[in-house]
Amino acid sequence: MNLENDKNCAWITDLDKRNNISSLENNEETDWLIIGAGYTGLSASRKLGQLYPNKKIILVDAQLAGEGASGRNSGYLVDTTLNDGFTSNKEFENYKKKTDIYELGIGAIKRFIKEYQVNCDWNEAGKYFASSKIEDKKILINFSDTLNKLGFEHRLLNNTELKKKLGTSFYNIALFTKGGILLHPGKLVRAMIDALPQNVRLFENSPLLYWKKDKEIISCNFKNGVIKAQKIIFATNGFLKSLGIKKNYNFPITLTASMTRPLTDNEFKSIGEPKEWGVCQ
Ligand SMILES: Cc1cc2nc3c(=O)[nH]c(=O)nc-3n(C[C@H](O)[C@H](O)[C@H](O)COP(=O)(O)OP(=O)(O)OC[C@H]3O[C@@H](n4cnc5c(N)ncnc54)[C@H](O)[C@@H]3O)c2cc1C
């Protein structure tokens, strides 16, 4: 059989086509304007819509909502990250704060998918931090010490155990954390679009070109219209700089991930039919 990988973002092509897309064609006035409809802008819009049901809220994206990084990432919901060097007490405190934020984030997504009955292939599969280099064991042991202090369930695995779990003998050493979750990022972000409250209007394919604040009014220029807002939230991720915000603070990078075709039954059998897993190298 001649199988080929496709050439699009598989998370997005996996979803039904949307038919409720509109772009900004007129001038508008609003109480709140949110720029960027990824996870951040969609969450902010939903929350504001719930808190202020009588206020006008507009959400705008340069492309289709949720089709930036939010709809095309690797789908890990992490409770811990491997940061070699969290050794001093101060760094340890900072790492703890980070994991507290991860916990809050996971809790928020859990509540969202429960409340809106979202199917986003939620899979509490845990996560492997793996390496093919045996000398990386010391990094994983340091990491294990940190996780022990914080009470995160985890364990170290060797090549033989990894072959059984992952179906490949490529990795020689790994640390498995139980709390990692895998999900379908496209389905999650689509559900967030569908859950936007009535008082949130969404305009897509409408990049913000420039903006200015005059007294208390923020005036935002788009190709086909101007939006005047009382308040604004920029949720454009790495593109903040192009809007003149925090110019020396962040910058966009290109990061790519790819999805292969599904394995055939024979291929799957040949690797020992492992359960779903996620590996971070
Ligand atoms: C390949 C890849 C893999 C990743 N894997 C993971 C992972 O496994 N787990 C994880 O937690 N994170 C992962 N990330 C990171 C994660 O996807 C991002 O942190 C997250 O999507 C950020 O969400 P956001 O809403 O802040 O920004 P984005 O999703 O980037 O949304 C910003 C939006 O702003 C819009 N925008 C930009 N400029 C303008 C403008 N001028 N006018 C109007 N709109 C504008 C963009 O079109 C975009 O839709 C990955 C990222 C990539 C690229």
Image (cartoon, grey):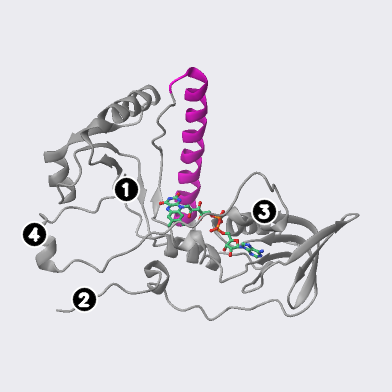
**Which badge, 1 or 4, comes first in the chain's sequence?**
1
Viewed as shown, does residue 170 lie left or right of 197?
A: left
Q: Which mark is residue 3?
A: 2
Q: Which mark is residue 267?
A: none
Q: Name the residue type under label 4.
A: Ser
Q: Which residue is mark 3?
A: 241
Q: What whole-number distance in Å separates the C-alpha atoms at marks 1 and 2?
A: 30 Å
In this picture, is 186 found above or below 155? below
Q: Tell me the crowding category of disc 4: few under 14, some 14 to 19, or many 20 or more residues within 10 angstroms, Cα based.
A: few
Q: Which residue is mark 1?
A: 124
* Residue in the picture at 38% in, 25% down: 146
Which numbered disc, 4 or 3, marks the residue closer to the eye? 3
Asked if the residue under mark 2 is in contact with the one under mark 3, i.e. CB atoms within 8 Å, the reply is no
Q: Secondary structure at mark 2?
A: loop
The answer to whether one can see residue 116 in this image is no
Query: Magenta span covers which residues?
Result: 87-114
Which numbered disc, 4 or 2, marks the residue closer to the eye? 2
